[in-house]
Image (cartoon, rainbow, N blue to C red):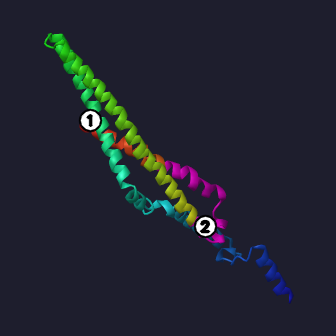
Amino acid sequence: MGKSARCEFAQRYNHDRRRPTPCEGKNTRFNKRCQNNSMAISLKTSGKLFSHPGPIRPIFRKYWWRILCGVLALLSVDTCQLFIPRIIKSAIDGLSHGSITDDQLRNRAAAILGLAVAVASFRFFWRYMILGFSRLLEQDMRNVLFHKLLGLDRAFFQRRTTGELMALATNDLTAVQMACGMGLIASIDAVVMTVA
């Protein structure tokens, strides 16, 4: 083995047999331009897994019945909460005008108690359905990310840091879970209360 062949073998061994890129030339301007381009490409491709709603749509289709039941329960809670102040208003108006009897007052109190029980029951139901869906979505997306990472080559892990991948699997997925859980609930509540 000649001297040049030994040097080439050592260079490849030290770089884990990585193929040389055009950025490894002697031109510093070209190197900087190449590095800037590679950084831009990495920023574009780092969010490819979750920048498009593709991975989320099948999960929404998979748990559509949980979302539907949770939304219906949430609408029931909002409706019951809107009826309670009206019953209290009618009872106070009847007392101020002296046109309400004791039996009617008891009936209104029983109606408020029944609506409170219904609100508690439906609230537990939508929390179980919608927040449970958000947890299942986070679990499924974490599994998708994990299986995707298992199929990537060594060059990908040389370009990405461990902290970046850990952030995708923890903080970013937690943000998606919160958006699809409490974010969905808050948006529906805001629309219903604004219309009412």
Q: What residue is at 53 percent from the left and 52 percent from the top?
A: 172
Q: How many marks?
A: 2
Q: Give the position of the N terminus as an image quadrant.
A: bottom right
Find the residue positioned furthest to the bottom.
1
In the image, is 121 to the left or to the right of 106?
A: right
| Residue annotated with mark 2 | 150
Q: Which mark is residue 4?
A: none
Q: Amino acid at mark 1?
A: Thr
Q: What residue is at 23 percent from the left and 21 percent from the top?
A: 108
* Image quadrant in which you'd find residue 74: top left
Tell which of 124 and 155 is nearer to you.
124
Q: Is residue 193 visible?
A: no
Disc 1 crowd, CA 10 A, few/some/many (<14, 14-19, 20+): some
Q: Amino acid at mark 2?
A: Leu
| Sequence-earlier tag: 2 or 1 | 1
> Would you say residue 194 sits in the magenta stretch?
no
Find the residue positioned furthest to the front.
103
Determine whether the residue tagged by mark 2 lies in a helix, strand or loop: helix
* Image quadrant in which you'd find residue 113: top left
Q: Position of residue 138 (x, y in %)?
A: 50, 53
Determine whether the residue tagged by mark 1 lies in a helix, strand or loop: helix
Instruction: In the rendered view, tell whether residue 114 sits above or below residue 138.
Output: above
Q: Give the position of the C terminus as an image quadrant.
A: top left
| Residue annotated with mark 1 | 79
Which region is colored magenta? 148-176
Q: What residue is at 33 percent from the left and 47 percent from the top?
A: 69
Q: What residue is at 29 percent from the left and 27 percent from the top?
A: 114
